[in-house]
Amino acid sequence: MTNGDLRGKIDKLWTDFWTGGITNPLTVIEQISYLFFCRMLDEAETNREKAAQRTGRPFKALWFGKDQQDLRWSSFRHKNGEELLTLVRDKVFPFLRTLDQPRDVNGDNEGAKIGLGALMKDAQLLIVKPGLLSSAISAIDDMEMSSTDAKGDLYEYLLSKLSTAGINGQFRTPRHILETMVELVEPKPTETIGDPACGTAGFLVKTMEYLRRMHTSPDMVYEGPDGRLVYIGDQLTPYQDHINNRMFRGFDFDLTMLRLSAMNMMLHGVIGRCIFYQDSLSESFKQNYPAEAEGYFDVILANPPFKGNLDTDDIDQELTRKVKSTKTELLFLVRMLSMLKLGGRCAVIVPDGVLFGSSKAHIALRQLLVDENQLDGVISLPSGVFRPYAGVSTAILLFTKGGKTGDVFFFDVKADGYSLDDKRNPIAADDLPELLRRWKTRDAKKDTDREAQAFFVPATEIREHKYDLSLNRYKEQVYVPEEYEPPLVILERMEKLEIEITADLRELRGMLG
C-alpha cells in the first residue's frame, strides 16, 4: 500500500468518525489506536506461534489464553452489528485494561508483567454505533501494516491531523536515519539502551530489530508475507529477561506518544515496562528515576525536540550549572552525559547551531564534549532530511562518556537515498552505506585528506577554533578554476551583437512606417 493509499483510507475513516458523532481529534486518534493495537496484538501472537513452529519449541501464549481466543482480531473482525459492539465493548476493552497485570495465560505461574501499565488502564470504547465500529474495524483490517514503516506512517498521518501536532518540536525521524544511527553504535544484547525523548520509540524499536537481525541463526530466517526477511532472534533467548525488564528505557511527557510507544515496544517483543511518563529535563527526573538519571545506560540514541527555551523554574539545576542555558538542544546533551555509564556511547541528532553557536553556553557544551569526554564523530546531514516537517540543518554527534578526545571523525552526507524536497521520493544517490563503511574502517592516520567525504580533525585544532564542530570549518573545498575568454574577444562579440540588434530595429521601424 502506498503512502497515498494509506492516507486516503485514514481520511475516509476520519470522516466516518465525524459523521458518527465523534469529532474530537484526540478521541478519534485514541480510538483508532486502540483498534489498531488489537489487530497488531493478534498478529504478534500469530508471529510467536509461527516462530515456535519453526524452531520446534512448544508454543507458550503470551496474550491470549485458551478461553480468550474470541478476543483476537482475527476472530471478531468479520462480525458486525450489536454482537460486535457488545463483544468489543464488554470483553475486548476490559481485556486491554488487564495488560499491566502479570500474564499467566498458560496456567503455569510463569507470567510476565506487560509494559503498558497505567497507559492502558483507562482504555474505553467510545464508539456507540455498531455501524461505525464495523466500518472502522473493516478499514483498519484492510490496511497493509506488515512493515514498521507503515505503522509509523499511520501514526504520523494521524497526528498530523491535530492542530497541536509538532508544537513541542516533535517530528518523526526517518527509518533509514534511525537504522544508520543504531548501526553506528552497534548495541549488544547485554547492554542498556535509553532515549530521553522517545516519541513513538523509534530508536528503541530499531535497536530491537537490529538485535534480532544480528542474533538469528541463518536457517531461522524466513520470508514474510510482504516479501521482507523475518528475523526471529532465536539466539537472544538467554538475554530475554534482560531485554524485557532492564535493557530499554524511554521517557516522554506526551501521553499520546507514550501509549503508542509502549504499544510499539510490546509488539516488537519487549513485554516488560520500558516506557515512562517523564520530562527528562525536569528536576523531578532524578527524583522519580534516580537509577536511570545517573550512570545507567551503555547506549543512548535520541533525536530530542528543538523546542527553544524552557521555563527556568522546572529545569534541573544540575544541568544549568554545567551549561548555563534554557535551550533544550543543549540541556538534553548534558542530561545524556549524566545518564550514560563511564564508557557509554551516544548517537544524537542536533541542529547545526549546536556545532558552531558562539554563545558561552554553546561553547561550554562543546568544550564539555571535547575536553571531559571523548567526541568520536560529527556526521553532517543534508538539510532536507526532515522535510516536509522541518527544513533545519542537522548533524549526528557520536561521543563516549569519559575518555579523551583525540582525532574526531567527520563525514559529509550529501544524499540519503531520497529527494531533499517535501516529496522525499526515492533516488539513487545514497551516502549512508558509505558512511557506515568508513566509520567501521576509520583510521585517523589514513583519512587525512580534507577534500574527501570522510576525514579526521585533531582535538588540538578544534580547540584552536573555539571548539567549532561544523564540517565546513575544516573541510577543504576543491576549487576548479574557471577559464574565461579574453576581455577584448568578449567586447568584440558584444559590439557585433549590438550592430545586429540595431539593424533589426531599423527593419522593424521600416515595417511599421
Image (tube, helix red, strand yellow):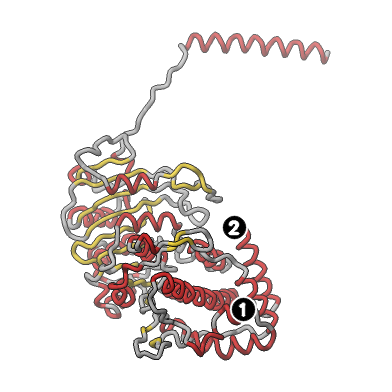
Q: Identify residue for label 2.
A: 2
Q: Which of disc 1 and disc 2 is earlier in sequence?
A: 2
Q: Amino acid at mark 2?
A: Thr
SS of the residue at dot 2?
A: loop
SS of the residue at dot 1?
A: loop
Q: Identify residue for label 1.
A: 77
Q: CA distance from mark 2 to mark 1?
A: 23 Å
Residue at image coords 67%, 13%: 501
Q: Image check: 341 left or right of 143?
A: left
Q: Quadrant of the C terminus?
A: top right
- Nearer to me, 299 or 483: 299
- Nearer to me, 150 or 69: 69
- Above-or-below relation of 372 to 79: above
Residue at image coords 69%, 85%: 81
- The spot of residue 162 in percent (x, y) is 56, 69
User: Do labels 2 and 1 touch, CB within 8 Å?
Assistant: no
Residue at image coords 39%, 82%: 114
